RNA sequence: UGACAUAUAGUUU
């Protein structure tokens, strides 16, 4: 089912699930979550709900239901079906299921995608009042949601809170925060974040680099962008098309057509075509 | 003994 989903065959993936059911094979939650994940990948949220109902109809153990509901919330969340997401959460609770970190992270992603960062924050309060400890993913998701709503101060508060709570930021946290450095003065903050990453031994990856290149570009610090790119390149960071795109975007702010063409050539030399 | 599943970050405003 997972292989079919990877190949874009979500319909056949769901048929396989039905075939299993038709033969009386019992509910393995892995199969259902794989099927719901396939629906999510291709925006088939109605099918995700349908698949969840099939799982529920089998009256499986609590942990299977948890996985199923969480996967469904994720699927509807990605499709921005907020009402459906809220219904699912309510149904979970009504069925005596206690939302866990996965549930809340999926809820925060859903609210973030819908631009309602206030609701992402409410989710944090809810989980805390229910005694569910926010983990790294929950914090990262919340920070991303807040930054999407341009709530930089609140995002920084959360960053502080995770540190105080003994959850050190990871490369995704830093990348998220860096991607929120949108004002012209923010490149200095970006540099101090990079220095901090270095001091705690977290290596920037291609996504981190892309985010910082954009920060420099937005700030008009094109030379710094080029310098950082070269530094990372020499350090062996694996560059992808996004890195090149971001650097070309930054360089173009100063209208250096030659430099852009040079970068484009370098990109092709490395076997990367334009996207 | 082993394999498999659900949540978070980057460019194109």
Image: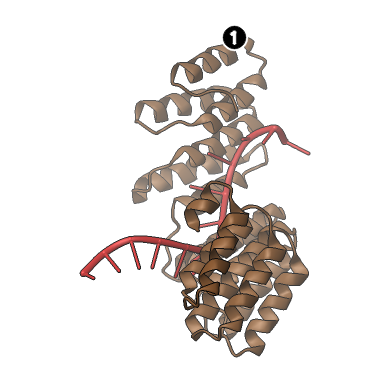
Q: Quadrant of the C terminus of chain A?
A: top right
Pick the residue in front: A32 or A127: A32
Vertical placement of residue A198 versus A216, above or below: below
**Residue A79 visible at all:** yes
Q: Nearer the viewer, residue A137 or A53?
A: A53
Q: Residue furthest front?
A: A23
Task: Write the residue at 54% across / 36% down.
Answer: A210
Helix, strand or loop status at disc 1: helix
Q: Looking at the picture, how far across and down is residue A194, in whole percent?
A: 45, 42
For chain A, the rendered hue is brown
Spot the red chain and give its letter.
Answer: B
Numbered-mark total: 1
Q: Position of residue A75 (x, y in %)?
A: 64, 62
Q: Is residue A119 left or right of residue A136?
A: right
Task: State the residue lying farthest toward the top.
Answer: A258
Compared with A67, A157 (above or below) is above
User: What residue does disc 1 label?
Assistant: A258
Assess disc 1: are there few (<14), some (14-19) or many (≥20) residues with their C-alpha within 10 Å of its C-alpha. few
């Amino acid at each position: 089912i997972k292989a079919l989903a990877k190949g874009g065959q979500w319909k056949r993936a769901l048929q396989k699930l039905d075939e299993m059911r038709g033969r009386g094979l019992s509910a393995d939650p892995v199969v259902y979550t794989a099927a719901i994940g396939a629906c999510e990948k291709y925006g088939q949220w109605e099918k995700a709900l349908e698949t969840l109902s099939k799982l529920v109809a089998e009256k499986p153990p609590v942990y299977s239901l948890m996985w199923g509901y969480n996967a469904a919330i994720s699927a509807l969340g990605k499709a921005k079906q907020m009402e459906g997401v809220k219904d699912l959460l309510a149904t979970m609770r009504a069925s005596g299921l206690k939302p866990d970190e996965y549930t809340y992270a999926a809820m925060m992603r859903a609210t973030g995608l819908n631009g309602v960062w206030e609701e992402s924050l409410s989710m944090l309060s809810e989980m805390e009042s229910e005694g569910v400890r926010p983990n790294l993913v929950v914090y990262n998701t919340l920070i991303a949601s807040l930054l999407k709503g341009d709530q930089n101060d609140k995002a920084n508060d959360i960053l502080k809170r995770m540190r105080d709570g003994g959850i050190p930021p990871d490369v995704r946290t830093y990348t998220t925060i860096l991607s929120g450095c949108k004002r012209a003065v923010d490149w200095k903050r970006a540099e101090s974040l990079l220095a901090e990453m270095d001091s705690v031994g977290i290596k920037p990856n291609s996504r981190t680099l892309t985010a910082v290149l954009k920060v420099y570009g937005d700030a008009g610090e094109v030379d710094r962008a080029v310098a950082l790119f070269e530094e990372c390149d020499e350090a062996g960071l694996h560059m992808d098309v996004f890195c090149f795109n971001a650097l070309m975007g930054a360089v173009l702010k100063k209208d250096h057509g030659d430099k852009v063409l040079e970068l484009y050539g370098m990109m092709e030399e490395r076997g990367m075509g334009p996207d």
